Image: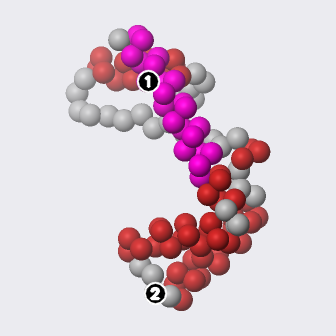
Amino acid sequence: MDWRLDTPAQAAEVMRAQDAVGGPESALIVAHPVPEEEQLDPGLHARVLDEALRACEAEGVTGQAVTPFLLDHLVRGTDGASLAANLAAVRGNVRLAARIAASWAGGA
């Protein structure tokens, strides 16, 4: 990790600094963890993912078909818990992105 930002306003400041510098396009990648109580159990994830990877190989699934195959296997193998965790990640990222966007727009 190169930097740590603790608030949406700090992320917006970095974005403004990037805009001020100009030059080639750049990106800011923001990592936002899923709250622990909404995470998928790591042991369950590892077991079901291993099963999914073996099934993928056994069935000859390759290329672009791998991701949907694995996700489907994970959802079925965790009784939907993996989907709930993924949705929690998406919702958290959307909330954070909205806060960063509001901070960025407010300081422009």
x, y percent for residue 52: 60, 76
Amino acid at pointer 1: Ala
Magenta stretch encompasses residue 44: no
* Magenta region, residue range: 86-107
Q: Nearer the viewer, residue 73 or 22?
A: 73
Q: CA distance from mark 1 to mark 2?
A: 43 Å
Q: Is residue 14 visible?
A: no
Label 1 secondary element? helix
Quadrant (top left/top right/bottom left/bottom right) for the N terminus: top right
Residue 74 found in image quarter: bottom right
Q: Earlier along the polypeptide chain: callout 1 or callout 2?
A: 2
Q: Is residue 98 visible?
A: yes
Q: How is the image coloured?
A: secondary structure
Determine whether 57 is above or below 94 in the image: below
Q: Label for residue 60?
A: 2
x, y percent for residue 97: 48, 31
Amino acid at pointer 2: Gly
Magenta stretch encompasses residue 102: yes
The residue singled out by tag 1 in the image is 101
Say whether marks 1 and 2 touch (CB < 8 Å). no
Residue at 68% across, 72% down: 77
Determine whether 86 is above or below 61 in the image: above
Residue at 48% across, 68% down: 68
Residue at 60% across, 24% down: 6
Mark 1 nearby-residue class (10 Å; few <14, some 14–19, many ≥20): some
Quadrant (top left/top right/bottom left/bottom right) for the C terminus: top left
Q: Label for residue 71?
A: none
- How many numbered dots are placed on residues in this image? 2
Q: Nearer the viewer, residue 83 or 50?
A: 83
